[in-house]
Image (cartoon, coloured by chain):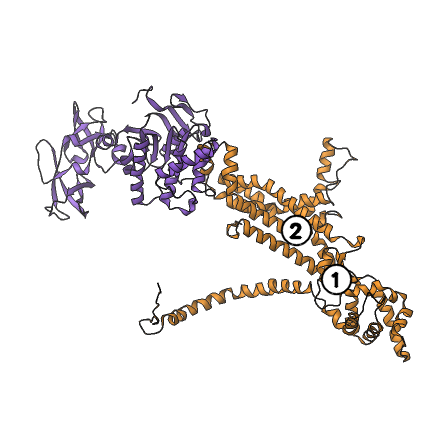
Chain colours: A purple, B orange
Amino acid sequence: MNDTSQSFVKFEKIDKSYDGEVLVVKNLNLDIAKGEFVTMLGPSGSGKTTTLMMLAGFETPTNGEIFLDTKPISKIPPYEREIGMVFQNYALFPHMTVAENLSFPLEVRKISKAEAKDKVQKALDMVELGNFGTRFPAQLSGGQQQRVALARALVFEPRLVLMDEPLGALDKNLREQMQYEIKHIHDRIGITVVYVTHDQSEALTMSNRIAVFNDGVVQQLSTPDILYEKPENSFVAKFIGENNTLNGVVKEINGNTCTVDLDNGFGTVKALKVNVDGAGDKTQLSIRPERVTIDSTNPDANNFQGKIEELIYLGDHIRARLDVCGNNEFIVKVPNEGSFSHKEGDILNLSWNPDDVRALDI
Amino acid sequence: MEVTISTAELLTTDGIPLKQSLRKAERRNKLRAFLLVFPLLLFIVVTFVMPIGDMLLRSVDDSQINSVFPNTFDEYKNWDKGADELPPEEVYKSLFFELANGDKRQIGKALTRMNYAKSGWKSLIKKTTREIKKIIKKGEEPISYKETFIKINKLWGDPTYWYSFNQMVNDRSSIYYWNALDRTFDEDGEVVLQDEKRRMYVKTWLRTFKVSIYVTIFCLILGFPVAHLLANLPLRYSNLLMIFVLLPFWTSLLVRTTAWIVMLQQNGVINGILVWLGVITDDGRIQMVYNEAGTLIAMTQILLPFMILPLYSVMRVIPKSHMRAAQNLGAKPAMAFWRVYLPQTIPGISAGGLLVFVLAIGYFITPELVGGKDGKLIGSWIAYHLKTTLNWGLCAALGGILLGIMLIFYWLYNKIVGIDNIKLG
């Protein structure tokens, strides 16, 4: 997919600065294939929205070039880019009805009235709002407005659709429902989507690939499962999913694995070598809560003890906050099989596999 | 299907009817709310509703003169103008005694009123009254009152004086309104145009409308970009710009108006600069003040904030993403502005337009000072009659028409835009 000849959208060495002092996007190189659903995920201020705005044409890259379908687009004004966009607050025009909103892009393209009407109706049917054409945006619920915005971004058959946190204003249930809906529409019409969000579960649900942004740099670009299971640095490990960390110093490296001495003499951990260079490097170990088992010992694994600080009953599992090797935010998820009888203050035997511990940067 | 409603009254737990209990609970709150607004209500009634009501009554009121000459007017109504050239003897007789026995002050007031209808009445009656008093002193009873009057002054034989009574014979009269539109009543009580030399109001009304419309348009043209900048510049700059808008707004109207005189007069700043630059010669200095142009320039500047502020408050809440969305959908910037931005500013345009227009048609000080002869608006006539001729009935009628125009515009605005959409800041 990184082959230029295949990439539909290509960011090449993009830098962006607003004030000439701070770079909000640093040396961005990103390839998006045709038909792909790529999400830019990151905390606010990480440069993901700026990247999207550069693609839409509302911001100019300070350096580098963006290619769409192999053609550079920096010089093309936004209204000639043929890129659909769903804005954060939908940006529906309040003085036009839903149908007028949808036919606006068709009208400016001088498409005949009859054809436009047909396309508008198809687009409305696609988002299941076929009978809402005569309403004004203010007469719709948030979820319906969102669908209209989506339909409007698709109705003129753009080459690419951008979505800037489109579900941010919806409540939780509706947000999840819309995630599936957008995903299904994407699957059905096969359009290329670039999606921006700060919500990791949204990104995991919908995307083919996710680019994790932090501090203007893409930290990792990968499929959701790889991002979760094989984060390449501690930022990604912390940002995607829940994560337990232990700090230490690399003692020895053996091929793919390494041993790490924990700080303050809490012992030694066997881990996968991911983002450390050699012995003596400081490292942060990352362990997912569901990969820790309790009350079992395995000579090949890492065996430690932890004191239960807090237990939270969550129905399908019990969430235990432990004090392990000086980290009192160590989370373990215990499946609720009816046999868990420990109380707060108890000491638990914990073990985890070396393959599930990743030695990352600090 | 017939719906049966239970007739049983709802009761509270204590057995009191629910409605009664609710009323009791609400009474204190209602009373408190009323007492809070009462001073304001009183203030509005005393300073707003009553004066306007009084003004509207005055504009149709002609009772004073009717109380001075009741019999004369009664007899006057019997005059068959087609048959007789002059009123019947009874009219002269009633007038004779009402002039002889009437209260001097009341007659004085009535004479002022009569002079509005036809100039010359005042001196004629004063002279006549003196002669009548002499006749009574001598104890003579005239054989013919008509002849006596005409002997005193031959103008009593001029029917046009008598015709002007037509304007006064009723307690309630629309004559002031007709006067305010350059109309009057002829001998048959029909509405006709005034003499050519007395026609000035229609001309002034038309000028008032023209100036108000121009001022509104200029304010819109000048104010729209300013309001847009105010709404879209970074806070640092927009605050500064806002001060530039508001500072003149807070400055005394008189100061700003006189400043315009300084700027615009023939030996003023602008002419001076133009002469210095060689754009015009020293003899060709432009007359920019004491005419309609001066009124237009000064009023536009003075009323500009009333356009900018409502526009600004509307533009401030139009999301910037709308213009972006329009362009993203394929509209060029001009098209995006025309189709997406402008329609959303209509509440502001109409609120500002209404405000500026309504203020402009009633404007007085600025046109009075910079307008000269050709730039005066209807407000100047109101002030003139209020202070100089004391013809308050005509003042009230002119004011009443102004009020009516404003109400019409308000109604139109409400019909077209909806008064709920008004945004003043």
Looking at the image, is A265 positioned above or below residue B415? above
Q: Chain of mark 2?
A: B
Q: Position of residue B385 (x, y in %)?
A: 74, 58
Label 2, residues with CA under 10 Å away: few <14, some 14-19, many ≥20: many
Disc 2 on helix, strand or loop?
helix
- Along the line of sight, the residue nearer the viewer: A335 or B274: A335
- Along the line of sight, the residue nearer the viewer: B275 or B166: B166
- Along the line of sight, the residue nearer the viewer: B67 or B93: B93
Q: Chain of mark 1?
A: B
Name the N-terminal-most of marks 2 and 1: 2
Q: Which residue is mark 2?
A: B361
Q: Is residue A288 visible?
A: yes
Q: Is residue B233 visible?
A: no
Q: CA distance from mark 2 to mark 1?
A: 22 Å
Does residue B34 appear to the left or right of B365 in the view shown? left
As drawn, the label of residue B390 is 1
Tell me the kind of residue under disc 2.
Ile
Q: Quadrant of the N terminus of chain B?
A: bottom left
Name the residue at 55% across, 42% down: B227
Q: Quadrant of residue A209?
A: top left
Of discs 2 and 1, which sits in the foreground? 2
- Along the line of sight, the residue nearer the viewer: B50 or A281: B50
Does residue B313 appear to the left or right of B384 in the view shown? left
Disc tally is 2
Tell me the kind of residue under disc 1.
Leu
Q: Quadrant of residue B146?
A: bottom right
Q: Position of residue B312 (x, y in %)?
A: 53, 44
Disc 1 on helix, strand or loop?
loop
Q: Position of residue A53 (x, y in %)?
A: 41, 32
